[in-house]
Image (spheres, grey):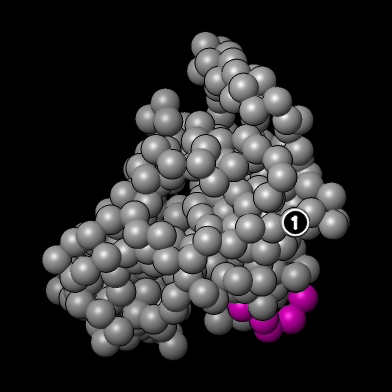
């Protein structure tokens, strides 16, 4: 996704940072890498109060590819702490990981679409200003989300796809991609209604706009999608988005794990593949 002057500028900035710090760039980190964890770093304050990040990064090296990690929970629940073991594993793999909380839909909160997307954009903006302090590369950020968090990451990536500062890649573990079909029937129909703030019959256009499958552009970042073969989110969600990405000429990888596990429960199987994808697609 990075081309010409933009790539040169980023590489130049990275070289300058490493020279100033007199350390070598490390990717991936070694298995014995020491990890620093900083919890509850506030990235924004709104009418509902502060929103915070937990940050995981390799202690002794700098300039690491950075990840905005987004938890799941059907848009209505979940917390950044859900990502503890995954974030540690990513940090061991040489990434600086910023796990964000965002405002939740009812009954866990009062926020409806697109509020959580707006929150995550603020988290990304904060990372752009502060990632280097936590050993990350502010110009080299990917979005990685699970379940509803994967959906939000895909939506935010599509909104930023034409920006010169958009994400270098996006990873979704079991992300819903077609909210319209979910709003008509299925076990998550009520969760989708809470997230959108109305029924599909009441505002079908909102369901269409909030569906990543309808937002694909040729400028979208390289995308990694992973699902179980028989899980909570039908495999058709991933297949439909993969097909749209292929039609638009967007680099992507689609991984299916046999079984019924969902979201972070498939991370153990797919995380090595996702990290290789990120290392290859990020500068």
Q: Position of residue 92 (x, y in %)?
A: 74, 56
Magenta stretch bounds: 257-262
Query: Is residue 254 in view?
Result: no
Quadrant housing the C terminus: top right
Farthest right residue? 31
| Quarter location, residue 74 | bottom left
Residue closest to the eye, 227 or 6: 6
Q: Is residue 107 left or right of residue 251?
A: left
Q: Is residue 51 left or right of residue 73?
A: left
Residue closest to the eye, 36 or 225: 36
Q: Position of residue 29 (x, y in %)?
A: 79, 47
Q: Pointer 1: residues within 10 angstroms few (<14), some, or many (20+)?
A: some
Residue picked out by circle 1: 34
Q: Is residue 155 left or right of residue 27?
A: left
Element carrying mark 1: loop
| Quarter location, residue 46 | bottom left
Query: Is residue 64 in view?
Result: yes
Residue closest to the eye, 269 or 55: 55
Which residue is at 44% across, 88% downward? 187
Give the prevailing secondary structure in the magenta stretch. loop
Q: Is residue 260 magenta?
A: yes
Q: Is residue 31 left or right of residue 97?
A: right
Which residue is at 59% across, 62% downward? 37
Q: Position of residue 131 (x, y in %)?
A: 49, 42
Image vertical order of residue 102 relative to residue 26, above or below? below
Quadrant housing the N terminus: top right
Q: Is residue 95 magenta?
A: no
Which residue is at 52% across, 11% downward? 5
Which residue is at 67% across, 63% downward? 88
């Amino acid at each position: 996704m990075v081309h010409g002057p933009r790539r040169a500028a980023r590489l130049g900035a990275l070289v300058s940072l490493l020279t100033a710090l007199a350390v070598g760039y490390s990717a991936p980190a070694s298995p014995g890498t020491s990890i620093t964890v900083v919890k509850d770093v506030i990235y924004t304050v709104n009418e509902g109060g502060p929103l915070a990040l937990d940050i995981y990064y390799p202690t002794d090296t700098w300039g690491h590819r950075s990840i905005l990690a987004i938890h799941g929970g059907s848009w209505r629940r979940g917390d950044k702490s859900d990502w503890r073991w995954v974030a540690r594993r990513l940090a061991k793999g040489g990434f600086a990981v910023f796990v964000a909380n965002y405002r939740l839909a009812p009954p866990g909160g009062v926020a409806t679409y697109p509020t959580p997307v707006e929150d995550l954009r603020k988290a990304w903006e904060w990372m752009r200003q502060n990632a280097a302090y936590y050993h990350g590369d502010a110009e080299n950020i990917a979005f990685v989300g699970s379940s509803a968090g994967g959906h939000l990451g895909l939506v935010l990536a599509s909104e930023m796809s034409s920006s010169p500062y958009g994400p270098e890649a996006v990873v979704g573990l079991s992300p819903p991609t077609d909210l319209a079909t979910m709003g008509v029937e299925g076990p998550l129909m009520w969760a989708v209604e809470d997230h959108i703030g109305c029924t599909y019959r009441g505002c079908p256009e909102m369901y269409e706009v909030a569906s990543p499958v309808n937002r694909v552009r040729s400028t979208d970042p390289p995308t990694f999608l992973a699902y179980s073969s028989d899980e909570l989110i039908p495999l058709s969600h991933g297949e439909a988005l993969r097909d749209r990405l292929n039609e638009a000429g967007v680099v992507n990888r689609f991984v299916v794990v046999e079984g019924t596990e969902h979201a972070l429960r498939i991370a153990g199987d797919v995380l090595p593949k996702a990290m290789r994808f990120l290392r290859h697609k990020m500068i």
